[in-house]
């Protein structure tokens, strides 16, 4: 008989499974605006609106650069604003089969590039109009926020996270003894 191994032993097996918890009912949840994604959406909406106002009050607002900037700003304002409402009322959670994180990643990536172009064009025209220079500042800020949001969405989608709802780990332990 081997002295280093006991005659009897017990094997413990722990299995961890993950269950997805979603609540399909529509409800208002103001706590979303205190989360990082909620704060980013609010900042994006505000920056879009401020940039739009700066271009609109300029006497050069009908210039093609102003038109492009306002198109980008209003597109971002409406898309981000609608997403904010969908998250506030947990409609995203209700339709959890839709790949929300991938949609948001694509949108934020595109808007990062759009704001790079729009803000650069506005900054170049800032020598003619101060309001274009201020709009360019808000545009570059929006570009950074959309870029950071795109990076967060990419990481979340890659890790398998849910847009809204949660994965709950559940551990099940079983104890088995070998047959003699």
Image (spheres, grey):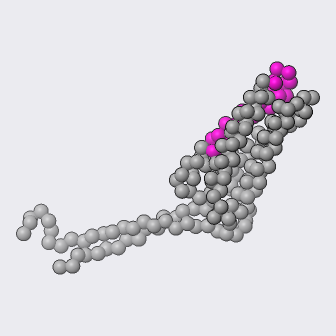
Expressed as whole percent of the image width and height from the top left, the position of residue 21 reads: 58, 67
Expressed as whole percent of the image width and height from the top left, the position of residue 64 reads: 85, 32
Residue 2 falls left or right of residue 89: left
Which residue is at 42% across, 66% downward?
A: 16
Majority SS type along the magenta span: helix
Whether residue 123 is visible, yes or no, is: yes
Residue 162 falls left or right of residue 69: left
Residue 48 falls left or right of residue 155: right
Q: In which quarter of the image is the C terminus?
A: bottom left
Query: Residue 129 in magenta?
Result: yes
Residue 55 position by quadrant: top right
Query: Residue 144 in magenta?
Result: yes
On screen, residue 88 above or below 11? above
On screen, residue 99 above or below 152? below
Expressed as whole percent of the image width and height from the top left, the position of residue 66 reads: 84, 33
Which residue is at 74% across, 28% downward?
A: 120
> Residue pushed farthest bottom?
180
Which residue is at 79% across, 49% downward?
A: 78
Residue range in magenta is: 125-150
Expressed as whole percent of the image width and height from the top left, the position of residue 177 reads: 25, 75
Nearest the eye: 67 or 53: 67
Q: Quadrant of the N terminus?
A: bottom left
Residue 13 position by quadrant: bottom left
> Residue pushed farthest left?
1
Whether residue 141 is visible, yes or no, is: no
């Amino acid at each position: 008989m081997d002295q280093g191994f006991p005659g009897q032993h017990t094997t413990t097996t722990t299995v961890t499974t993950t269950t997805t918890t979603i609540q399909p009912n529509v409800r208002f949840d103001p706590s979303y605006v205190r989360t990082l994604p909620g704060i980013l959406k609010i900042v994006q909406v505000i920056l879009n609106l401020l940039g739009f106002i700066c271009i609109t009050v300029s006497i050069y607002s009908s210039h093609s650069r102003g038109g492009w900037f306002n198109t980008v700003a209003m597109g971002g304002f409406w898309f981000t604003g609608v997403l904010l409402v969908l998250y506030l009322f947990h409609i995203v959670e209700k339709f959890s089969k839709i790949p929300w994180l991938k949609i948001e990643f694509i949108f934020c990536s595109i808007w990062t590039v759009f704001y790079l172009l729009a803000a650069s064009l506005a900054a170049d025209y800032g020598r003619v109009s101060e309001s274009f220079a201020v709009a360019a500042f808000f545009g570059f800020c929006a570009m950074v926020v959309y870029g950071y949001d795109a990076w967060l969405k990419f990481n979340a989608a890659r890790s398998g996270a849910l847009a809204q709802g949660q994965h709950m780990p559940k551990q099940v332990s079983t104890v088995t003894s070998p047959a003699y």
